[in-house]
Amino acid sequence: MTDKADMALVALDRAGLDAAHVRLLAGARYRASIYLPTMDPGVLESDAVLSELRRLATSGRQARVRILTHDANRGHREGHRLVALSQRLPTAVSIRVPTDETHLRYGSAFTVDDVSAFLFRPVAQRFDAEGSLDAPGETSRFMAYFDEVWERAEPAWEIRPLGI
C-alpha cells in the first residue's frame, strides 16, 4: 500500500517545481496536458522535464502533449524550449491559444497526466505548487476545464516552423 505522503507533489521554488513536474510526467503513459498562461523562462524548460515530455510524445500512436498558453508569440520570441519541442514533434505536441476573454483571465497554471496526477500553481508567475500522483477526481476536474478551453482555443499558427 502506498503512503499518501509518497503521492504528494509540493514545490516552493523553481528546482522543486522542476522536480514535481518530472515526477508527474515520469508516471504518465501517453498524455499530458499543460495550462501555462505565460511561458516564463525556466518553467518547464529543464533537460529532465523536456526529456519526459519527449518520451511521452514519442510513446506511440496515443501520444499527445497539449499545451495551452495565452501568449505563444512571447514563448517563440524568447526561445522557450516548449515551442522548440512542439516544432520538432508537431504531430504529438500541440500548442493552442485561448480566444475567449474569460479564459484569457485565468491566472493559474497546472499540469495533468492521462489518469490521476496533477500539479497546480494558484498563481502562474510563482513557483509554489501542490498536487498529487493519485487524485483521479481532482485530475478529472482539471481535465474537464482544460478540454473546455482547448476546444475553443486556436492553434498557435504563428510559431510553426517555416520548413524552408
Image (cartoon, rainbow, N blue to C red):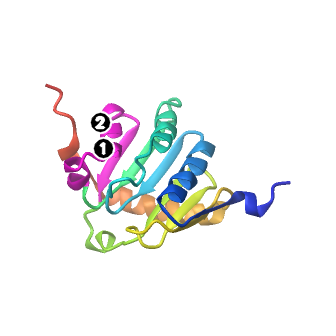
For the residue marked with disc 1, what is the amino acid? Answer: Val
Q: Which residue is mark 2?
A: 87
Looking at the rendered structure, the secondary structure element under dot 1 is: helix
Mark 1 surroundings within 10 Å by alpha-carbon count, few (fewer than 14), some (14 through 19), many (20 or more): many
Question: Which amino acid type is shown beneath numbered disc 2?
Answer: Gln
Q: Residue at x 37, y 72 (%)?
A: 107
77 versus 107 height, above or below: above
Q: Quadrant of residue 141?
A: bottom right
Quarter of the image with the C terminus is: top left
110 vs 162: above or below: below
Looking at the image, do the residues carrying marks 2 and 1 touch, with CB atoms under 8 Å apart? yes
Q: Nearer the viewer, residue 91 or 3?
A: 3
Viewer can see residue 134: yes
State which region is magenta: 72-97
Instruction: Estimate the x, y position of residue 83 in percent, counting from the top left.
Output: 30, 44
> Which element type, helix, strand or loop, lies under badge 2?
helix
Q: Residue at x 42, y 51 (%)?
A: 44
Q: Position of residue 59 (x, y in %)?
A: 53, 31
Quadrant in the picture for residue 106: bottom left
Which residue is rendered at x = 38% and y = 40% of the image? 93
Q: Is residue 60 left or right of residue 117?
A: left
Residue at (34%, 43%) from the top-left corner? 81
What is the number of the mark on residue 83? Answer: 1
